[in-house]
Image: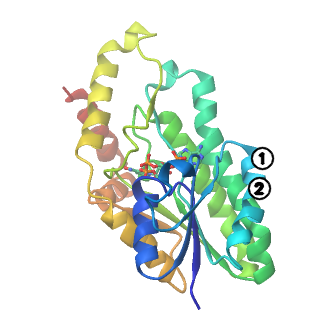
Amino acid sequence: MTMTVLITGASSGFGLMLANRLHTQGFNVIGTSRNPEKYTGKVPFKLLRLDIDDDASIKALPDELFRHVKQLDVLVNNAGYMVTGLAEETPLDVARKQFETNFWGTVKVTNSILPHFRRQRSGKIITVSSIVALIGPPNLSFYSASKHAVEGYFKSLRFELNPFNIKVSMVEPVWFKTNLGANAVKAASGTISDYDTYRRKADAETKKGIDDAESPDAVVKKIAELIAAKDPKFSNPVGKMTGMFLFLQNYAPRMFEGSILKSVANAA
Ligand SMILES: NC(=O)c1ccc[n+]([C@@H]2O[C@H](COP(=O)([O-])OP(=O)(O)OC[C@H]3O[C@@H](n4cnc5c(N)ncnc54)[C@H](OP(=O)(O)O)[C@@H]3O)[C@@H](O)[C@H]2O)c1
């Protein structure tokens, strides 16, 4: 039977690439965007309107979804964005908004689909988290915190869903070339002059990460593997440096911290 996959944030980046790949492979793909009309005739799969910051939009999702499909097999929580900037200079409303989308939006979308998965006693939830959910680099504190929150939420939830045969997996990418950098919200900077030198270096280091990013194929391939897997792993870091980051953090934490301090200190 054809599998049906719902992908939030399928207008760009990982979501768009994954949706195209699965559609080509014969999956029944339903994507979402805040502005689906912008993509009419440009994508081969169905795009529903969804703003994960908007409760009414999320409430309407299941009815809208099941108008188009009879059942759902996989939810890919992918929609999200990144706030960059130093923690103390980030206005709290900007930080709260980051959580509203990346954490609460993901939780609310998941809650809107769970009754269906519980009823059918099966389902798979794959959430695009980030390597910054597992490590905490400077200049990304609220993005990192929002992804840590998502990771912690699903770490617990997966046990509660086990009796219903609902599998939960996270994908934790490093830097990959999508529109994440272009769509990032840069928190106000320059409000605390003590940080002037550090901020310049930290911004340069963040920019380097975005500029040197890998091709997104590896992330899309990993999500496709998780969709196909009978018993997918919970945590799935993706990217050339992930193994080394996590090894150092766990087994040589002083060396790991030193390398982060040094990378910012040496930035242009
Ligand atoms: N690229 C990386 O290096 C990287 C690394 C780690 C994790 N990630 C994560 O990967 C996920 C996808 O990002 P990407 O890198 O592919 O970036 P992207 O190219 O900017 O795509 C982001 C997608 O999210 C959707 N979106 C954003 N805010 C939304 C909202 N409030 N409601 C509904 N949809 C929203 C956008 O759709 P519309 O604008 O059409 O609504 C878009 O399709 C994000 O969760 C991001 O944090 C990315």
Residue 209 rendering spot, x and y as whole percentages? 28, 42
Q: Nearer the viewer, residue 130 or 155?
A: 130
Quick check: 33 above or below 92? below
Residue depicted at 32% across the width and 27% down the height: 203
Residue 63 rendering spot, x and y as whole percentages? 77, 64
Quick check: 64 above or below 148? below
Residue beneath disc 1:
56
Badge 1 local density, few (<14 within 10 Å), some, or many (20+)?
few
Residue beneath disc 2:
60
* Picture quarter with the N terminus: bottom right
Mark 1 vs mark 2, CA separation in Å: 6 Å
Which residue appears farthest toward the front when viewing the image? 41
Quick check: 62 above or below 225? above
* Picture quarter with the C terminus: top left
Toward which corner of the image does residue 70 lie, by quadrant? bottom right
Toward which corner of the image does residue 95 lie, by quadrant? top right
Q: Relative to 21, is 226 on the left or the right? A: right
Secondary structure beneath dot 2 equals helix
Q: Relative to 191, is 102 on the left or the right? A: right
Beta carbon of the mark 2 residue lies under 8 A of ligand 1: no
Q: Nearer the viewer, residue 159 or 77?
A: 77
Asked whether residue 253 appears in the rendered view, the answer is: yes
Identity, as a three-letter code, of the amino acid under mark 1: Ala
Secondary structure beneath dot 1 equals helix
Which residue appears farthest toward the top when viewing the image? 193
